[in-house]
Image (cartoon, rainbow, N blue to C red):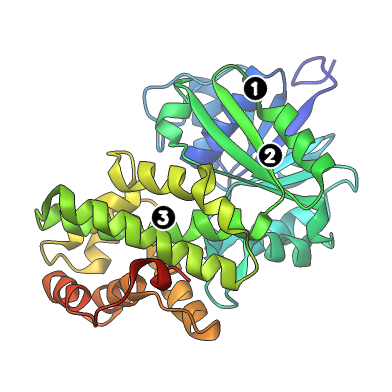
């Protein structure tokens, strides 16, 4: 017997944020001994001694099968599944550290929603480069899934995508239970693009609520936001059907309407003119939509895609445009045909 107990099922989760901790809990409930990696010795001690991630999920007891560690080699030892949940800006660094300790037969899954802003690359591309694996060997998990609800075992449904159905089904088997339903999808590009861009639209939803523009405005924002997600995704090679599913409209709705959405909260705070730096400082957590707005702005130009909501949010975030002026510019665009504009 080793220090984590007798079992043949081991998983590693990198890193110990709210989403990583919630997914570690899912795996632990499914019988895995989970090693949850963190850079913070204080956080590891809190998890191991108090059975709680007080920083990100206060008040929730964690399963005994979760063991936190700051030792990357130990975290990945014997791991059948390695689940990367690092912020998009840190994914390459975490993957680089993990690469030397990762077994060739370990299933690699990531659950991060964003792009690498310097290269505009998707997370599977970053992982492929740093881990020395083909993208066909990787799996992405996405969908409407707030950590605050998953950790409480509230009913949640997600999707795992991979070019390899064998890999996708392995991830499905590892994660699925009666509280956490998992579907498979072969469209990796679509799932990743949808998961990333919906955070931008959630910032906009927070802005519209902060400006008290009402339900009509939010409904329009979500609908036209979905059009932008689909437009960029298909230009990058995704299937349009993906955007009508869990990774698309499902994740968009939950992120734009929930009190748990950090992107919505950030947008709400921006509405009253609070500077971006102050908003991010108050949040105390990564707001992926901010960096993703910059990346999507560049991707739209690269792929010659119309993304007016994204462009206006870029101006609000990085060019000091007032939110009200941004809305006026959106509403004052030249007339167009709705279905034609979806292409």
Q: CA distance from mark 1 to mark 2?
A: 21 Å
Q: Which residue is mark 3?
A: 286
Q: Is residue 81 visible?
A: yes
Horizontal relation, residue 290 to residue 123: left or right: left
Percent across and percent down for residue 66 are 63, 25
Q: CA distance from mark 1 to mark 3?
A: 25 Å
Percent across and percent down for residue 300 are 48, 79
Horizontal relation, residue 179 to residue 130: left or right: left
Number of the front mark, 1 or 2: 2
Query: In front: 256, or 108?
Result: 256
Contact? badges 1 and 2 (CB < 8 Å): no
Number of the front mark, 2 or 3: 2
Residue shown at 58%/73% (left/top)?
235
Q: Which residue is mark 2?
A: 184
Dot 2 alpha-carbon crowd within 10 angstroms: few under 14, some 14 to 19, many 20 or more: some
The vertical placement of 292 against 220, above or below, is below
Q: Which residue is mark 1?
A: 28
Percent across and percent down for residue 341 are 39, 72
Contact? badges 2 and 3 (CB < 8 Å): no
Dot 3 alpha-carbon crowd within 10 angstroms: few under 14, some 14 to 19, many 20 or more: some
Query: In front: 152, or 94?
Result: 152
Residue at disc 2, secondary structure = strand
Residue shown at 28%/75% (left/top)?
312
Horizontal relation, residue 267 to residue 209: left or right: right
Q: Quadrant of residue 55?
A: top left
Mark 1 / mark 3, whichever is N-terminal: 1
Mark 2 / mark 3, whichever is N-terminal: 2
Residue at disc 3, secondary structure = loop
Q: Quadrant of residue 70?
A: top right
Residue at disc 1, secondary structure = helix
């Amino acid at each position: 017997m080793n220090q984590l107990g007798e079992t043949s099922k081991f998983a590693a989760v990198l890193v110990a944020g709210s989403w990583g901790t919630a997914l570690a809990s899912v795996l632990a409930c499914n019988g895995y001994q989970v090693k949850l990696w963190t850079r913070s010795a204080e956080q590891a001690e809190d998890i191991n001694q108090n059975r709680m991630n007080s920083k990100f999920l206060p008040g929730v007891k964690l399963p005994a099968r979760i063991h936190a560690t700051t030792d990357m080699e130990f975290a990945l030892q014997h791991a059948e599944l390695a689940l990367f949940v690092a912020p998009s800006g840190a994914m390459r660094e975490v993957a680089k550290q993990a690469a030397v300790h990762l077994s060739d037969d370990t299933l690699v899954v990531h659950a991060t929603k964003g792009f690498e802003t310097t290269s505009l690359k998707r997370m599977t591309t970053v992982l492929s480069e740093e881990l020395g694996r083909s993208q066909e060997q990787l799996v992405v998990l996405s969908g409407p899934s707030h950590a605050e609800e998953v950790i409480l075992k509230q009913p949640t449904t997600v999707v795992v995508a991979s070019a390899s159905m064998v890999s996708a089904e392995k991830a499905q088997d590892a994660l699925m239970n009666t509280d956490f339903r998992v579907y498979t999808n072969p469209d990796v590009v679509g799932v990743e693009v949808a998961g990333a861009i919906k955070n931008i639209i959630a910032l906009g939803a927070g802005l519209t609520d902060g400006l008290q523009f009402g339900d009509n405005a939010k409904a329009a924002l979500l609908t036209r936001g979905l059009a932008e997600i689909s437009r960029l995704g298909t230009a990058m090679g995704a299937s349009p059907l993906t955007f009508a599913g869990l990774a698309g409209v499902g994740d968009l709705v939950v992120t734009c309407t929930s009190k748990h959405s950090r992107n919505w909260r950030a947008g709400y705070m921006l509405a009253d003119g609070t500077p971006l730096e102050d908003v991010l400082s108050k949040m105390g957590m990564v707001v992926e939509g901010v960096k993703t707005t910059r990346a999507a702005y560049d991707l739209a130009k690269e792929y010659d895609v119309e993304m007016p909501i994204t462009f206006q949010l870029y101006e609000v975030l990085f060019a000091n445009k007032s939110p009200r002026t941004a809305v006026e510019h959106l509403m004052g665009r030249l007339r167009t045909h709705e279905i034609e504009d979806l292409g």
